[in-house]
C-alpha cells in the first residue's frame, strides 16, 4: 500500500475548493470560504465487497 496522502477536493460543508492544511492537528483542513476547520481520517476497509 502506498504511503502517499490525499487531500480533500472540496469542503464537506459548503462545497468550495478553497482549502488549506490547518495547524489544528493531523488531517485538519481549513475552508477559507465558510471559515470551518474539519478533519479527514481514513478508518479502514470493509471486510467484504460492496455490491449494488
Image: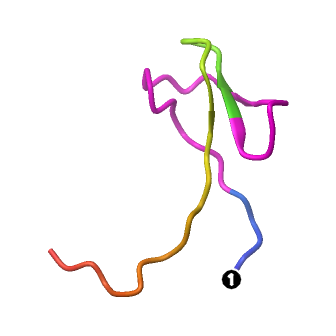
> Where 23 falls versus 34 (above or below)?
below
> Quadrant of the image for the C terminus?
bottom left
Q: Is residue 10 left or right of residue 32?
A: left
Residue stretch rendered in magenta on the structure: 6-28
- Going 55% across and 27% down the picture, which residue do you hit? 17
Residue at disc 1, secondary structure: loop
Residue, far right: 23
Q: Is residue 13 left or right of residue 1?
A: left
Q: Position of residue 42 (x, y in %)?
A: 59, 61
Instruction: Name the residue that disc number 1 marks.
Output: 1
Quarter of the image holding residue 27?
top right
Counting the numbered discs, the total is 1
- Going 68% across and 83% down the picture, which residue do you hit? 1
> Where 48 falls versus 42 (above or below)?
below
Q: Position of residue 7 (x, y in %)?
A: 65, 47
Q: Is residue 52 left or right of residue 5?
A: left
Mark 1: few, some, or many residues within 10 Å (few <14, many ≥20)? Answer: few
Quarter of the image holding residue 32?
top right
Quarter of the image holding residue 48?
bottom left
Residue, far left: 52
Q: Position of residue 9 (x, y in %)?
A: 54, 40
Q: Is residue 13 magenta?
A: yes
Amino acid at each position: 500500500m502506498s504511503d502517499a496522502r490525499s487531500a480533500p477536493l472540496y469542503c464537506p460543508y459548503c462545497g468550495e475548493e478553497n482549502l488549506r492544511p490547518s495547524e489544528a492537528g493531523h488531517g485538519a483542513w481549513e475552508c477559507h470560504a465558510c471559515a470551518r476547520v474539519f478533519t479527514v481520517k481514513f478508518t479502514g476497509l470493509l471486510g467484504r465487497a460492496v455490491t449494488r
